[in-house]
Image (cartoon, coloured by chain):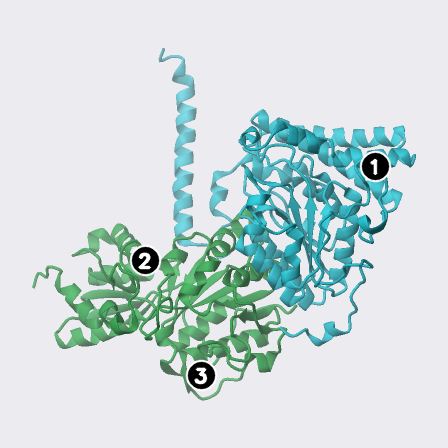
Amino acid sequence: MTATTTEHETPAASAPTQLTMAGALNAALRDAMAADDRVVVYGEDVGPLGGVFRVTDGLQARFGEDRIWDSPLAESGIVGTAIGMAMYGMRPVVEMQFDAFSYPAFEQMVSHVAKMRNRTKGRMTLPMVVRIPCAGAIGGVEHHSDSSEAYWTATPGLTVVMPSNPADAYSMLREAIDSDDPVVFMEPKSRYWSKAPLTLPVTTAPMDRAVVEREGTDVTLLGYGPTVRTALEAADAAEAEGLSIEVVDLRSLSPFDDETVGASVRKTSRAAVIHEAAQFGGYGAEVAARVTERNFHHLAAPVLRVTGFDIPYPSPKLEEHYLPTADRVLAALDTWEWDD
Amino acid sequence: MRTPARWRNIGRMSLDVEHDSVRTLPSEKPIRLLDNAGHAVRGAAAGGFELPELDTLLELYRRMVVARRFDVQVTALTKQGRLATYPSAYGQEACEIGAISAIEAQDWFFPTYRDSIALLTRGIDPGDILQSFRGDWHNGYDQHAHRCASQTTPLATQALHAVGLAHAARLRQDPIVAMTYLGDGATSEGDAHEAFNFAAVWQTPTVFLVQNNQFAISVPVSRQTHAVTLADKAIGYGMPGFHVDGNDVAAMYAVTRAAVGRARSGGGPTLIEGLTYRIESHTNSDDPTRYRSARDVEHWKRRDPIERLEKYLVSEGALTESLRAEMTDAAEAVAAHTRDVMTTEAELDPLELFDHVYARPRATLLEQRARLEAELAEAATHAGAAAPHAGAAR
């Protein structure tokens, strides 16, 4: 077995090319598999088809069926066997195909993936990645647009990250695969086809850190995955009205980067968190509580949550009414009392 | 998944049995090599399996005697309040010891909460096995050192781990077999189905032993399945299934040994059902009189796996008095050691609660750890300050 490194090696740097997030994830898997033969990839339709979102496109042809293969259609089986493979020293990267299809694996995730290291006092680590295409805005029928992040973030022992752009997608997936902790790697489906010029391999901020995507002075918008773009759109629109919005991409949902978020909130004194998932008991509740507990005396207003409604995810023709938009974000900011 | 090229030319180890076909149902009558009177069984009832050598049977006997003594000791300690709980395997020694004795040092074992005596047989110290049942930590032994996964409570979940590990070993071309135990109730779980299926599709070197002790806590096996035997399930997955007398250690050893050999040589997984009976309650907090008759228990007590082998060994002149005394001494030594370790309170460090959750340290956990540390320091100060004045105040 070859030793793994934290540096992203492999292919020689070249001129930047336009890459989608799906393409960046594909490259990350390819480079990780080339760098470390302990990395194996399996799941539903990841072989000849290349995954329903084509994230594993071409990988089986390149690496063969001993490194990447189609498993039986059973998510608990996929995660459960990945645990066994990780116990033997492999670094499995498994795909859940769609967010809502990860639920059969819930017991394996919560009872074993999250607890194995603690149960065994660190003697048995599970270096594995569970990739979960997540969230909506893709016109998907029922069960294809869920946001399940709060189930995972509520579970001690899991590391939960969600990139919002192609560069982070590459860098964070490489880091997740190299991590000795199991990582729930959530991929916002609506961003799979977003493009950015990239020179690979690219290393962005560590995956446990939030990043200030756009600087501002009046309000901090906290987004992750698909809602980073929403926050940036809101910031653009607000600028015209003279409101300076800082946008923070959380990137890491568990752990939470209190330092970066706290610094931004203390500067702006106002914060709102945006996510697609329903509000009640959602991830935003934790964000609002944490930010308030740690920065109360620096806040001029309560931390807001701009989220999906507290209803099951709607059918495709109605989802536009559910999803938090830039307009809805700006309307929410208007509910604060402003001194001037 | 297509069979990787390097596996295609490996021949299947012949089980040399009539029904060595994945399209043949196991016999309804369990395979048996020793009957209840301790007589060797031959012909069709033996399913084509050979009675193991006397030396092997003596060793299996010794292991069962030690395991029984340990189990009785731990049940007693639990009644004395030394353990939070203990799921006994009294009466199931032929399954527990026969199967675990069929794997080698390099193989892996994936046990449930009821399989402490198999872990003991695997060479793990009683104190380490019982850390979880004493309530010190959720698991107390080194998995890698013994190649034993932690005892699993969520039913059938560990079977998937066994399949995954076996598959990883196969991809690495390591000649390793993963054996897992399940109960009759666990076969109703979705994970049992997924594990059987993944193992068969991937042709992993996995041996599934279903210990059918006839009750899932209180629910009889007739309410778990409509199949004639639990081993019947194998045929649907395309793997061989064997229905074995689970109180006959000779049969349990011979059948699992063949399955392990078959798995190791690339022949894929096997499902074995050992038909046995849980003599003790589910755990110390259970009341079995509510769901089964004393007559039923007595019936099964007369089918004791240890007595059965003992009769055979005595009739063969293999179990001498000195050998028997040696084994009793060994069993008593294990019981004494178990009493020693379980009556000595372990020093627990509450701060360790934070130390193993993540490989990468987390700021939030460090904060919470510091908070608990301060609480403990304050409590210690109070205890120290309060003691001298306690008498004076009255």
Q: Which chain is cyan?
A: B
Could you say which quadrant of the image residue A257 lies in?
bottom left
List the residue tagged with mark 1. Answer: B38
Q: Residue at x 60, y 78 (%)?
A: A63
A172 or A108: nearer the viewer = A108
Q: Nearer the viewer, mark 1 or mark 3?
A: 1
Q: Which mark is residue A199?
A: 3
Q: Is residue B124 visible?
A: no
Q: Local crowd at mark 1 within 10 Å, few (<14), some, or many (≥20)? A: some
The hue used for chain A is green
Query: Which chain does the residue under circle 1 lie in?
Result: B
Residues under labels 2 and 1: Cα distance? Answer: 64 Å
Asked whether, in this view, residue A150 is left or right of residue B232, the answer is left
Task: Select label 3 or label 2 by which is in front.
Answer: 2
Q: In this picture, is B180 found above or below B263?
A: above
Q: CA distance from mark 1 to mark 3?
A: 75 Å
Find the distance from the CA under tag 3 to the CA under tag 2: 33 Å
The answer to whether A177 is drawn above or below residue B347 in the figure is below
Q: Residue at x 91, y 37 (%)?
A: B316
Q: Position of residue A228 (x, y in %)?
A: 30, 71
Q: Secondary structure at mark 3?
A: loop
Asked if the residue under mark 1 is in contact with the one under mark 2, i.e. CB atoms within 8 Å, the reply is no
Disc 2 secondary structure class:
helix
